[in-house]
Structures are given as structure tokens and as C-alpha cells.
Amino acid sequence: MSQFFPTQPGYRALRERFLKAATELGADLSEYPHPLAGPFGERLFTDVAWIGPPDARKVLVALSGTHGVEGYYGSDCQSRWLESLKGRALHEGVAVLMIHLINPWGTAWMRRVNEDNLDQNRNYLNFARPLPDNRAYREVHPLYACEQLRGPLRDRADALFNAAIAERGWPGLMSVVEAGQYEFADGLFYGGKGPSWSNRTLRSIVARHLSGVEVAACFDLHTGAGDYGHPMLMSIVESGYPALEDAQALFGPWLFTLITGANQISATGVAATSTGYTSQMLLDALPGVHLMPFVIECGTYPGAEVHQHLRDDHWLHLHGDPLDETGRAIKRGLLEQFYPADPDWQEVVWVRTRQIWEKALAALPGIRP
């Protein structure tokens, strides 16, 4: 159990369960040690499991923990599915690749971001090119740098925050904040100045396991946006891609394709104005693969409520102690926003995630580039 919360599994328990399930399937396992430790001194790893023939040309990929605290959902589903595969034979020429907690620091410390306060889904960029310039964020950045969790300074920041909502509307304000910014390392949705450890690690995993395959369906697992208990199946990309027709044929109206760009607005709760998403990086990194990049985004609480908890956790990162009473209360609140304790929520998102994976696994043998 977690030393943060006695009722929830912590990073160690998530990892142990995943490794046990993968080992019992005879998976080819590899680990990528993170340079930093967890909050209680535990070593951190991204673990990779390959299930199936080593020369498989068609692969189902499941990636968890891009946003650390969201890895609780992702890890649970990965382990459950591996457990359910025991005793089953995969189709000939098909393999499953599980990438477990690509941002292990964020999962262990119960943060959405990584060790550098960096949002992984704003970091997959070509840093040799000029970075996006989110000038509008500069106006609201002071709201997120407030030195008080409660008190007159926070009250003033809240008043200014509400005024910004009145001026721009909630979607308009979030299109600025969530677009990502590359100027303030102490701000929200910071994309960084270069590739993060998780970025470099994922590229290494992809090059090792996927560069020679023919067809791949990759599922990046997320929570926190959308209606409560509703897992949205999405493809989040900058433009159409060669396998899009196959993706649409496979899932039909269940699949929502979100094209990102500077002036895009989405009603899904997922930022359409941002760049640096995992899905687009995979397409760029694997030009020779007939790749279908998917996102499963499981809705939790209303966006304004989730954002309030992100602000509190951001204050904790800048000014507090995650292990004192206030810090633990903030962590409990943040975990609830991204992995509700409600057993019905947990069961619904697992069942739907399993359905999606089973459908893709059954379809892979018939998909031709």
C-alpha cells in the first residue's frame, strides 16, 4: 500500500503487480531506471513487456503514465489485461507491447507532470526548431505563482482568475493555459527546453521494439477530461495520417479524431491548441509503420474542479511539503480527480478499455498497409 494513502496502492505495488502478470505470461521484460528516487527513497523504473513472437509484424501497444498520477488507471488496466491473457494464444504474427509508467517519477510522487514540472504531452517537439510562443499565457502566469494556498494572496489570485474566466470564458481561458508554454518553468503546462527523460526513454523503446514492424495500434492511457466514467477513444494528431481510414473503419463512431492547432477549440475537455502530443511523436518517429495512434481518455470530474486541484498541487510543488499533513491532503484530492475511488468508475473504465483492446487485437491480423 502507498505510504501516501493506506487505502491505495503506491508506485511499488503497481510495479510489482505489473511485473508479476507479465512474468506469468512469459513476457520479454526490460527496464529503464529513472535517475531520481521516489518520495520514500524507492527506485523508479519504466518497465516494458513484449508478449508474443519476437519477430511479430503486427503489435498492439499500451502506454501508461504519460501524466504520472493518471498512471493509476493505466497501470491497473495493463495488469488486469495481462492477467486475463493468461492461457490464451495470440494470433500468429501478433504481439502485445506494454510500456508501464513512462513517467514513473510523476506516478510515485503523485504529480501529473514530471520531475522538472514538465507536461510530457507538451514535450514531444523538435527542439531544434523555434518553440511555440504562448504570449497570452504570460498574462495569467502570476495566478499560478501565488505563494499562498489559503489567505489574502490566494483570494486575490482567485479573484483575478475569476475575472479572466469572465473575460475569456472557461474554454477560452483553458485554450490559453492548456496550450502549453515554454517560458515559465514554474508555470502550468510547461513544455520544457529540451527532451525530458521520459521523452528520450520512450523514443528508445519505440526504436527498439517498433521500428521494424508492419502495423501497430498504440493506446496512450489518460484520465481527467470528459464526462464522469466515460472513456473517450480519440486520435489526437496535427493532421490526417495514412492509417486513419483503418482506425475509423475499426472503431467507427466510437473514434473521435482531434486535429490540433493554434486556433482549434475542442468540446472534449482535451486541449486542441497544444503541440507536443505523444501520438504525433509516434507518427513522426515511425514513418515506415502503418500506425494507428489512439488515446483513451477517461472522464472524471468537471474541468474547473480538476483545475482547482492542479493549482493546489502546483502550489505544493513550489512552496509546500508533499509529506506533511497539508501536502498529503492535496495529494489525496489530486488522486481522486484523476483516479476516483468509486469502484463503479474503476470497473466501467476497465471494462471499456478491455473492450477496445480486444477489438484491436482481433482486427490486427486483417489490417494491411
Image: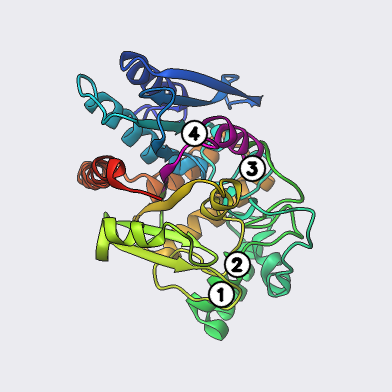
> Considering the image in quadrants, where does the N terminus appear?
top left
Residue occupying image coordinates x 45% and y 49%: 290
- Report the amino acid beneath label 2: Val
The answer to which of marks 2 and 4 sits earlier in the sequence is 4
Look at the image and give the residue range highlighted in magenta. 199-221
Q: CA distance from mark 1 to mark 4?
A: 30 Å
The percent coordinates of residue 293 (x first, y second) are 44, 52
Which-is-in-front pick, marks 2 and 4? 4
State the residue at coordinates (57%, 70%): 273
Q: Secondary structure beneath disc 4?
A: loop
Q: CB of mark 1 within 8 Å of CB of mark 2?
A: yes
* Left or right, 52 with reference to 105: left
* Residue position for label 4: 101
What is the C-alpha distance between the residues marked 3 and 1? 26 Å
Question: For mark 3, does the 10 Å Cα neighbourhood hold few (<14), some (14 to 19), or many (20 or more) residues?
Answer: some
Q: Which residue is mark 2?
A: 177
Disc 3 to disc 2: CB gap under 8 Å: no
Q: How is the image coloured?
A: rainbow
Q: With respect to residue 195, does 186 lie above or below?
A: below
Magenta includes 140?
Answer: no
Horizontal and vertical percent for residue 79? 33, 28
Q: Which mark is residue 320?
A: 3
Q: CA distance from mark 2 to mark 4?
A: 25 Å
* Left or right, residue 307 beside residue 148: left
